[in-house]
Amino acid sequence: MSRLRVHRAKELLIIGSSTLREIATKVGYKDEFYLSRRFKQHTGTSPSDYNKGGVQQVAVLLAPYASHLLTLGMEPSITITETSEYVHTDEIHPSTMKFIDIRSSWEQMKKVLMTRQVEIIIGATEHMREYGLSAEQLRVVAPVVEIAWMEMGWKEHLRLIARAVQRSERAEQWLTEFEQEEKLARKQIQNSPVVEEIITIFVIKPEGVFVYGARNVGYVIYRSLGLRPPALIEAEIRKYGDQFHSVPIELSDMELYADSGSRLLVIVYPDEKGSTIHSEQIFGSPYWHSLPAVQQKRVDLLDVDDWVPYNPVSVRLQLQRAVELLISNQ
């Protein structure tokens, strides 16, 4: 119980929104002095000195947050995931990162986390819930820093993770460089005829058709490059900002999102067996063939692995790909 309380105190110190007295009360200690004594017994340091040197052993729950850490020049000790959605680039070469299958038993997971002497675990409440985990459970091993997934965009993810590992300056430097790249890319696009087009992003999954908003490839198209979404999508982006991911539609509604001035970007998700045969129903339908962009051959098929990941490294690569794609096709 004492270890759990200290781990929770560490979480609140990382967040930095409470006084020591408030933290003591929140974790069940009578005052900040008792908290300090217990804290020092467990960590060898006082609460006020905790995390000043940053942490070294970090575990992340699901791979997108691994990419955020790699962007900050820090390799996660452990990534708990079912996919390796991080990106190898000239600057990033994970070498010691260990993967734990998120479908492993809790005892297996706990053993690896404790063997690696993990100092903090970074994850999203939504992801924990999806896989039957909880902050309370993980806190037995180490403090848990919860970074909401859908409630904010990737830049906010990066800033919060950077603060947790004491690398905020590096995060701001990276974001400044990226924003300069955005400006240059936007300038190139503004001098191209594509600026007059409406860009619709259709995503075909086994369960149906979706129109993407301001996340994933939609971030680059609508936010970075400032291109025009369909009117219905633009209204949702204005309302929900970067929280607006996508909207499911019927085949008969495709024309509402792709009028005569549209260019279509299409991503097909494979099914569990890796097949994309479900997309043939869409591409063979009269609704698809009636779209002006299809008739005018203004359709680009995008690879799901290149265009869907939502993390700093992937977004940067998507920006480069988008400029090449949209300008070369004029």
Image: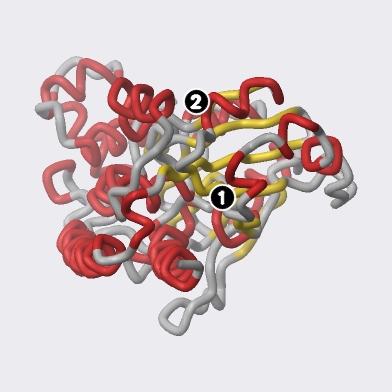
Q: Amino acid at mark 2?
A: Glu
In the image as oriented, which residue stretches furthest toward the bottom? 90
Of 75 and 282, nearer the camera is 282
Q: Is residue 310 above or below residue 253?
A: below
Report the residue marked by disc 1: 265
Q: What residue lies at 39% left-to-right and 63% top-to-bottom?
A: 319
Q: What residue lies at 69% left-to-right and 43% top-to-bottom?
A: 102
Q: Earlier in the sequence, mark 1 or mark 2?
A: 2
Q: Looking at the rendering, which quadrant does residue 185 occupy?
A: bottom left
Residue 326 is left or right of residue 279, and the answer is: left
Where does the image place residue 65, in percent across and percent down from the top left? 46, 51
Q: Amino acid at mark 1?
A: Leu
Of 293 and 236, nearer the camera is 293
Residue 247 is left or right of residue 72, and the answer is: right
Where does the image place residue 257, in percent across and percent down from the top left? 52, 30
| Dot 2 alpha-carbon crowd within 10 angstroms: few under 14, some 14 to 19, many 20 or more | few
Q: Looking at the rendering, in which quadrant would you find the N terminus?
A: top left
| Residue 214 in view | yes
Report the residue marked by disc 2: 136
Q: What residue lies at 87% left-to-right and 50% top-to-bottom?
A: 275
Judged from the image, the secondary structure of the residue bearing numbered disc 2 is: helix
Instruction: Mark 1 and mark 2 in contact? Answer it, CB < 8 Å.
Output: no
Q: Looking at the rendering, which quadrant does residue 236 occupy?
A: top left
Where does the image place residue 171, in percent across and percent down from the top left? 23, 60
